[in-house]
């Protein structure tokens, strides 16, 4: 019902409708996907723990604000209609909207993981997860972050990889969950579920944004061709490491629960 009502209203109402309709629209999406997962597997993020389900929303908002902070340097996207809001309203309303990012990606990843074809990735290439590997990843992540901040016009793609390479080793060193644990055994199911889940979410994010207002638009050097909605085609590739960054950041902030399950 939320999707059926908020989707058309988000596209046709006059004024700054998306500021108020983004959250209920995406909440509707999250609940629909959770119900599909429950139907297909017999359990879901909601049914396993309502407390942990709600917790994802509180984790999501500050995590996305971290990317907004990075965007102050890279300038890869901007929001139209910003001048219509007071500074307080412009920070409060987006925070509510940002709270849906991680729940949407995790729910869609759980849905992807419910299909039989994802089992093909249960016995893939083994990735070494040694102390030396984690040190190397951490150093590379810091170098990527530094390059992105120093030369954002060239190294802006590192926004979607540097935090992953920094926080995955931190999670390992501090005893938190990390996805290289599964890759060490050749189990790529969680990684692939997150990747496909993020691509599905990316499609809906961009589609629902296209006729929205306020909306985001992109400024991506070198990729200003062949757009699907506002996003250049190659830009969708950034959703894959972005999902893994969300997973690593969520494990850092809240290592115990909720977890994705194979």
Image: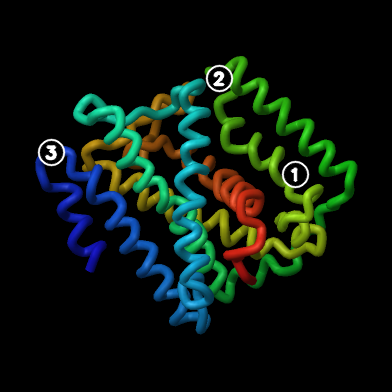
SS category of the residue bearing label 3: loop
Question: Where is 223 relative to 239, above or below?
Answer: above
Location of residue 19 by image quarter? top left
Q: Which residue is mark 3?
A: 15
Location of residue 79 by image quarter? top left
Q: Position of residue 48 (x, y in %)?
A: 53, 76
N-terminal-most mark, 3 or 1: 3
Q: Residue at x 67, y 22 (%)?
A: 146
Residue furthest left as drawn: 14
N-terminal-most mark, 1 or 2: 2
Q: Position of residue 242 (x, y in %)?
A: 55, 44
Q: Please tell me whether mark 2 or mark 3 is closer to you in this view.
A: 3
SS category of the residue bearing label 1: helix
Q: Quadrant of the C terminus?
A: bottom right
Q: Which residue is mark 1?
A: 170
Question: Where is 7 relative to 216, above or below?
Answer: below
Q: Tell me whether the residue at label 3 lies in contact with that at label 1, contact meaning CB atoms closer than 8 angstroms.
A: no
- Label 2 Cα crowd, 10 Å radius (few <14 / some 14-19 / many 20+): many
Numbered label tally: 3
Q: Tell me whether the residue at label 1 lies in contact with that at label 2, contact meaning CB atoms closer than 8 angstroms.
A: no
Q: Residue at x 58, y 61 (%)?
A: 193
Q: Which mark is residue 152?
A: 2
Residue furthest front as drawn: 88
Q: Which mark is residue 4?
A: none
SS category of the residue bearing label 2: helix
Q: Position of residue 256 (x, y in %)?
A: 65, 62
Q: Position of residue 226 (x, y in %)?
A: 39, 34
Q: Please tell me whether mark 3 or mark 1 is closer to you in this view.
A: 1
């Amino acid at each position: 019902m939320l999707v059926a009502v908020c989707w058309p209203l988000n596209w046709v109402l006059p004024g700054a409708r998306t500021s108020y309709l983004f959250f209920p629209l995406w909440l509707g999406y999250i609940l629909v996907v959770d119900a599909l997962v429950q139907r297909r597997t017999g359990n879901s993020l909601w049914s396993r723990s309502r407390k942990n389900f709600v917790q994802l929303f509180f984790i999501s908002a500050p995590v996305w604000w971290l990317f907004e902070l990075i965007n102050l340097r890279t300038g890869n996207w901007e929001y139209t209609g910003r001048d219509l809001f007071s500074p307080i309203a412009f920070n409060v309303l987006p925070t509510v909207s940002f709270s849906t990012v991680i729940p949407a990606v995790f729910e869609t990843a759980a849905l992807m993981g419910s299909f039989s074809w994802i089992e093909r990735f249960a016995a893939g290439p083994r990735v070494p997860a040694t102390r030396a590997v984690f040190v190397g990843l951490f150093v590379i992540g810091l170098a990527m972050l530094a390059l992105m901040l120093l030369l954002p016009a060239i190294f802006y793609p590192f926004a979607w990889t540097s935090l992953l390479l920094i926080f995955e080793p931190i999670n390992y060193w501090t005893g938190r969950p990390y996805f290289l644990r599964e890759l060490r055994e050749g189990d790529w199911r969680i990684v692939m579920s997150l990747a496909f889940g993020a691509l599905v979410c990316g499609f809906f994010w961009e589609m629902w944004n296209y006729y929205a207002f306020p909306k985001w638009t992109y400024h991506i050097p070198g990729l200003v061709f062949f757009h699907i909605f506002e996003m250049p085609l190659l830009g969708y590739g950034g959703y894959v490491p972005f999902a893994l960054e969300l997973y690593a950041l969520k494990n850092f902030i809240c290592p115990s629960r909720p977890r994705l399950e194979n």
